[in-house]
Amino acid sequence: MEKHFDINEQGLSIRCKLICKDSDKSARSFEHIAIVTHGFGSNKETAGTLNFGEHLTAKYKGWGVIAFDWPCHGMDARKKLTVAECLTYLTIVTDYAKNELKAKDVCIYSTSLGGYLTLRYLIEVGNPFRRIALRCPAIHMYETMSSRISEADHAKLRKGKEIQIGFERKMKIDQSFLDDLKSFCPLDHEYFDFADNMLILHGTKDEMVPIEDAQKFAEDNVIEFIPVEGANHPFQNPNHMALAIHKIIEFFHEGND
């Protein structure tokens, strides 16, 4: 079952989706919540997110899944993308899971840009998550973003102008956004304190975020790393996605009793 709702806090309205079993549709609380965050240019309504939520809640009791749109993505009302607002969204959604849904623990499953933001959140804000699963995390987010901006648009940014980026939906950024991304790379930080509760999966055929980046990050921090043979960045092959969902669901379920 899917239920759409908004969290209105701090002058922001975060578009969310709760996925749970049909028998739990009237539930006001869940023992465990898994938060799902998407990548750049995507949104909370992907088939992969729905499949993950349906599989997790069908297999194990007491679980609910919250997916939400990052600022400027999906149905979100913001027009200009900033890292600070992304981190604020994650705080608000996590607090909602704990305070409103009464979850005794919260896990997070993040992809690409979402993976970068989650890793940044752990260092700059703290770790409220029992388990953390990352799929194709954009370790070098600045380079990934910057390389896809034309030289003409880079020239506009250097002059203090805003440009529009994105796929189906366009959003505004300025030079300060890129500078902010450049100021933080997960490889510059230690994640040993989180490593035992982290899992990273990455496709060997990822054309957007090199698998070598995530593999080095995992090795440097002794984090379990699963290469998925033949998978591309969005894990479009249903078998690759099914494998990722299975691995993450079992990882989240471990040790929650």
Image: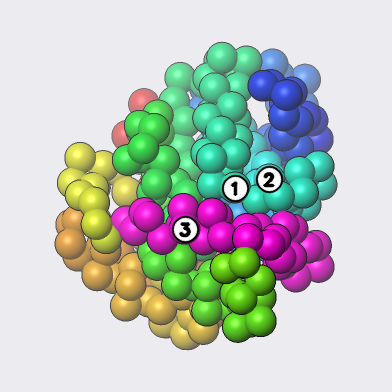
Front disc: 3 or 2: 3
Residue 190 image offset from top left, x and y in percent: 20, 49
Q: Amino acid at mark 1?
A: Thr
Q: Quadrant of residue 154?
A: bottom right
Residues rendered magenta in the picture: 160-186
The quadrant of the rendering that contains the N terminus is top right
Foreground of the two, 110 or 103? 110
**Mark 3 burial class by Cα count in 10 Å: few <14, some 14-19, many 20+:** few
In x, y percent, where is residue 82? Answer: 59, 47
Q: Which mark is residue 71?
A: 2
1 or 3: tag closer to the N-terminus: 1
Q: Is residue 51 visible?
A: no
Badge 3 is on which residue? 179
Tell which of 25 and 9 is nearer to you: 9
Give the answer, above or below, for where 134 lies relative to 254: below
Which residue occupies 24% across, 57% down?
Answer: 188
Residue at the far front in the pictured view: 159
Residue 204 visible in the picture: yes
| Disc 2, SS | loop
Residue under label 1:
82
Mark 2 is on which residue type? Answer: Pro
> Foreground mark, 1 or 3?
3
Q: Is residue 89 magenta?
A: no
4, above or below 78, in the image: above
